[in-house]
Amino acid sequence: MKNYLNLIRFDQYLKNLFVFAPLFFGREFLYFDLLLKVFLTFLCFCIASSGIYILNDLFDIKEDKAHPEKSKRPIASGKIKPQRAIYIMASLITLSLIFSFLLSTRLFFIIASYILLNFLYSKWLKHIAILDINIIAIGFILRLLAGTAITAIVLSIWILLITYLLALFLGIAKRRTDVALAQNGLKVRKNIEGYNLVFIDTILGILSSMIIVCYIFYCISPEVQKHYNSPLLYISIIFVINGIFRYLKLALVDNSTYSPTLIVIKDRFIQIMILCWIILMSYLLYFNR
């Protein structure tokens, strides 16, 4: 069972929680009908993303076998045969398309676009520097749009922009891990050939600044002020800034080789910042009336 959980990347399902954002920010999170629809949308994205992860592993078997960490993945290590993985992948992608079509035609096209985009990414586009991290960012935007499609709740343009920048930040941070390993003499994937640590660290600094500035503009924009109707919103800026600073510290000072998702799962400080942000925003949206 553990091998199959690793195959579908169960730990990466955190990314799909972005589909709940429209429901959360739209103050509709407590309505069971909408919550159920978004939960089913979340499952569709989980199934689709698992299929894509398997597809990516199938394309990268040779490279993964030479990687110090990725060689432990089920396909690269030989724990799951490629033929079985292909069957599981096809089943998951088919199920995600069927379920999304039953939920909403718009959701179906979003899921289909996500699958097509990631197929192109896995096969060719991940080897093109800058374009690769933009495709990762578009994947997060598609998750937000899926939540909007199923709830008809329109998000603030600031949330879309912050999500895009945050996804770019996490995407380039993921590249940093492989570049750091390569500089230590370890063989890693070819998709780092357009990067080096100086370039990546510069982009991380730029993106972290942009995320913070955009979040501040979100908090002070008139429509958002009217929506929350509380000066306590400014406190959330503290959690955002310190969460990003902590991540930069782990990446640039501690040279962590964990993926961004694993850092969030493992680092207590970042977890506390995220939890404090969720508690504060939940209070402002649902109890500050």
Image: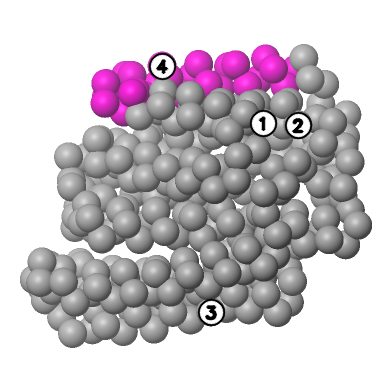
Which comes sooner in the sequence, label 1 or label 4?
Answer: 1
Res. 47 in view: no
Q: CA distance from mark 1 to mark 3?
A: 31 Å
Mark 2 or mark 4, whichever is nearer to me: 2
Which comes sooner in the sequence, label 1 or label 3?
Answer: 1
Element class at badge 3: helix
**Magenta residue check for 106:** yes
Reading the image, the residue beneath label 3 is 245
Q: Is residue 192 above or below residue 73?
A: below
What amino acid is labelled 2 in the image? Answer: Asp
Q: How dense is the environment of label 4, judged by Cα within 10 Å: few (below 14), some, or many (20 and up)? A: few
Residue at x 24% of width, y 73% of height: 217
**Which residue is nearer to you in this view: 178 or 288?**
178
Numbered circle sitting on residue 60: 2
Which comes sooner in the sequence, label 3 or label 2?
Answer: 2
The answer to whether the residues at label 3 and label 2 have Cβ atoms under 8 Å apart is no
Reading the image, the residue beneath label 1 is 56
Element class at badge 1: helix
